[in-house]
Amino acid sequence: KAGVTQTPRYLIKTRGQQVTLSCSPISGHRSVSWYQQTPGQGLQFLFEYFSETQRNKGNFPGRFSGRQFSNSRSEMNVSTLELGDSALYLCASSLGAGTMYGYTFGSGTRLTVV
Amino acid sequence: QKEVEQNSGPLSVPEGAIASLNCTYSDRGSQSFFWYRQYSGKSPELIMSIYSNGDKEDGRFTAQLNKASQYVSLLIRDSQPSDSATYLCAVYGSSNTGKLIFGQGTTLQVKP
C-alpha cells in the first residue's frame, strides 16, 4: 500500500514568489492535514481538509492557503514568500476526520526561501 | 501556556534501561492522545495512541494517560540505541473540529 506522497521533495524560491506543494494521501484516506516544521517552533498546524472542505485552520497569515480535490489529493499554496517561510512542510493523511484517527505523514517538502 | 508541553531534553539513558517521556496538555476536554517518533531528517511516525485513562502496552512501549492531571507519558522498556530519536506528544482537541496539536518533542539518546 503506497504511503503519503509529497511533491516536490525540495524547493528553492526567491522572496516574493509563490509556491504550490502537493500531497497524495494513502488510498482510501479522506482527511489531509498540513503542518509546518521548523527547529524553533516545532510542528505547527496549518489546516485540515476532509471531503474537500477545510475543517480547521491554524494561526497562519492569509498567504497560506490550501484545497482538497475530489480524489482527496491536496495542495497548499504560499504566496509572497518570506524568508521565515523556510521550513519543512509535512502533509498527513488519516482515514477520517475526528478524534480517533492517527495520522500518517509524508516525507515532506523542504522549502528554502532566499 | 503552550497547548502541549514536553521537556525538550535531551534525555539520556543507558542501553537496556527504561526511558520515561512526559507530556502535559492544557485543553481539559481533549479526547485523543498520540506519541510519534521522529528520526533526524525523517518525518514523524505514529507509535502509540491512547484514548482512556490508564495504561496501554504495545511491545516495549507503554503509554499512560491521566486526564484529571492532564498528563500523558510514554515508557520505553529495554531501551535500544535504535530508539534514539525525538518523541512528539500530540493531542486532539475537544471540539468536533479540533486539530491535532504537537508538543515540541523530547530528544532521547540511548547510549550503548
Image (cartoon, rainbow, N blue to C red):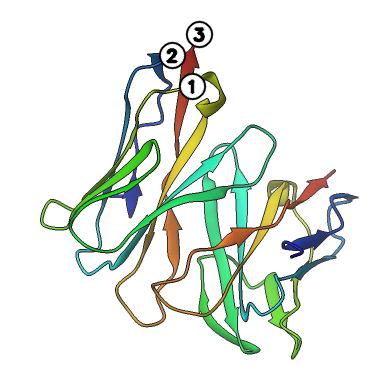
Label 2: element kind? loop
Label 3: element kind? loop
Q: Read off the residue under disc 1.
A: B80
Q: Read off the residue under disc 3.
A: B112
Label 2 close to label 3 by CB (< 8 Å): yes
Q: Residue at x 22, y 69 (%)?
A: B29
Which amino acid lies under the numbered mark 3 shown in the image of this protein? Pro
Which amino acid lies under the numbered mark 2 shown in the image of this protein? Glu
**Residue projecting furthest to the top:** B112
Tell me which numbered mark, 1 or 2, is placed earlier along the sequence: 2
Check if mark 2 and mark 3 are on a common chain: yes
Check if mark 1 and mark 3 are on a common chain: yes
Looking at the picture, does residue A98 appear above or below residue A37?
below
- Where in the figure is residue A17, as x and y percent of width and height? 87, 61
Q: Residue at x 54, y 38 (%)?
A: A40
Q: Residues within 10 Å of mark 1 (few under 14, many from 20)?
A: some
Q: Read off the residue under disc 2.
A: B15
Looking at the picture, does residue B45 appear above or below residue A69?
above
Q: Is residue B14 left or right of residue A1?
A: left
**Whole-number angstrom distance, CA of label 2 to CA of label 3:** 5 Å
- Where in the figure is residue A45, as x and y percent of width and height? 53, 62
Which amino acid lies under the numbered mark 1 shown in the image of this protein? Gln
- Where in the figure is residue A92, as x and y percent of width and height? 62, 63
